[in-house]
């Protein structure tokens, strides 16, 4: 049998470690040493910067001396070139003047071509505007606008138009089915005034029959007083007709009216009717190009 193992207590297995013995004096000495090391490093950096500054000052002095030498060389060159430079400059100026004149001539040619092209573009734009205005007016060929037709809260506008056609204009055969659309124009007015009435007929014949009877509207009767029937015009033609009526009121024109969407006028009572399409044509007809005032005279529109 072997020997019994000797039991070792926990207290016997612990190793005794030395305890720190730093004193307050030791800590002060350590702090002084760290401060001294940092101070030495800082002093070294300051010395290094001072050395660089002295080196830069030397370089600046050398540079100043070099600049003086360069200045002397330049003065010598200027003296040598005193007689050469003016001739050279004069020759260069002459060549530049010739080149500038060539460029100026080319510019005038280009400008002239641009002017011609701009005029062509301007004419083409006006032609396109006129074509669009003609098409728009053709689309309005079955329309009329009625002014002064009394507006009620609950109304059948088609029945009102039919009643106007048969009872007042004496067509006698107008039916609601002859009207494709009838409506009031714009927002409802709060002053009790009636809005204008837009009417689109199903056929050109029905529209012409209705429109051609417009002069039969008796003036003075309450039911039809101040009722006017006009053609539905494009914005341009409507403005042109408005200005023509102003000229009639001021007695610069004898009369004006619309016919199939065209603005017709007579300058004198004995003149033949003439159709006008632009404000310029209207001015020429009145012989008032310089002082005639129109609401659209400032427009560039030329149809």
Image: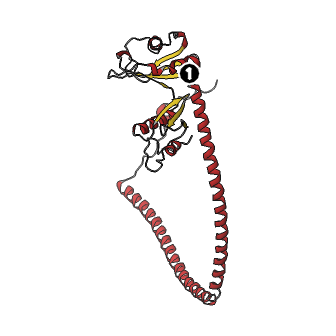
Q: Which of 94 and 63 lies nearest the eye of the viewer?
A: 94
Residue drawn at (57%, 16%), measured in percent from left and top?
A: 202
Would you place residue 135 above or below residue 251 in this image? Answer: above
Q: In what quadrant of the picture does the N terminus appear?
A: top right
Q: Is residue 197 left or right of residue 106?
A: left
Residue 264 picture location, percent across and down:
52, 34
The color scheme shown is secondary structure
Q: Which element carries disc 1, helix, strand or loop?
A: loop
Look at the image and tell me in which quarter the C terminus lies.
top right
Which residue is denoted by mark 1 in the rendering?
142
Is 299 situated above or below 173? below
The residue most toward the front is 270
Position of residue 50 measured from the top left corner of the image (x, y, whole percent): 48, 73
* Frontmost residue, 206 versus 103: 206
User: Residue drawn 61% across and 42% down?
Assistant: 125
Question: Which of 231 and 267 lies nearest the eye of the viewer?
Answer: 267
Q: Please provide percent x and percent y for residue 53.
A: 49, 74
In the figure, residue 262 lies in which quadrant?
top right
Q: Hey, which quadrant is residue 74 in on the image?
A: bottom right
User: Going 51% across and 21% down the picture, which residue do you hit?
Assistant: 212
Q: Residue 259: horizontal and vertical position, in percent?
A: 54, 29
């Amino acid at each position: 049998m072997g020997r019994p193992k000797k039991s070792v207590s926990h207290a016997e297995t612990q190793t005794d470690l030395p305890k720190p013995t730093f004193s307050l004096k030791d800590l002060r000495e350590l702090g002084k040493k760290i401060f001294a090391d940092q101070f030495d490093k800082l002093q070294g950096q300051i010395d290094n910067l001072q050395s660089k500054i002295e080196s830069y000052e030397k370089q600046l002095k050398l540079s100043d001396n070099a600049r003086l030498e360069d200045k002397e060389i330049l003065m010598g060159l200027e003296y040598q070139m005193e007689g050469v430079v003016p001739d050279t400059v004069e020759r260069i100026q002459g060549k530049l003047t010739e080149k500038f004149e060539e460029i100026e001539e080319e510019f005038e040619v280009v400008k002239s071509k641009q002017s011609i092209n701009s005029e062509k573009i301007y004419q083409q734009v006006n032609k396109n505007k006129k074509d669009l205005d003609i098409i728009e007016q053709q689309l309005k060929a079955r329309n009329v606008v009625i002014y002064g037709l009394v507006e009620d809260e609950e109304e059948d506008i088609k029945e009102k138009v039919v009643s106007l056609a048969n009872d007042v204009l004496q067509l006698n055969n107008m039916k609601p089915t002859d009207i494709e659309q009838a409506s009031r124009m714009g927002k409802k007015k709060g002053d009790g005034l009636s809005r204008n009435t837009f009417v689109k007929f199903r056929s050109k014949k029905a529209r012409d029959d209705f429109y051609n009877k417009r002069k039969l509207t008796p003036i003075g009767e309450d039911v039809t007083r101040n009722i006017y029937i006009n053609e539905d015009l494009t914005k341009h033609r409507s403005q042109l007709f408005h200005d023509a009526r102003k000229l009639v009121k001021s007695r610069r024109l004898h009369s004006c009216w619309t016919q199939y969407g065209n603005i017709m006028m007579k300058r004198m009572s004995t003149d033949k009717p003439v159709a006008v399409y632009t404000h310029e044509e209207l001015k020429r007809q009145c012989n008032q190009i310089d002082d005639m005032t129109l609401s659209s005279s400032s427009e560039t529109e030329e149809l």
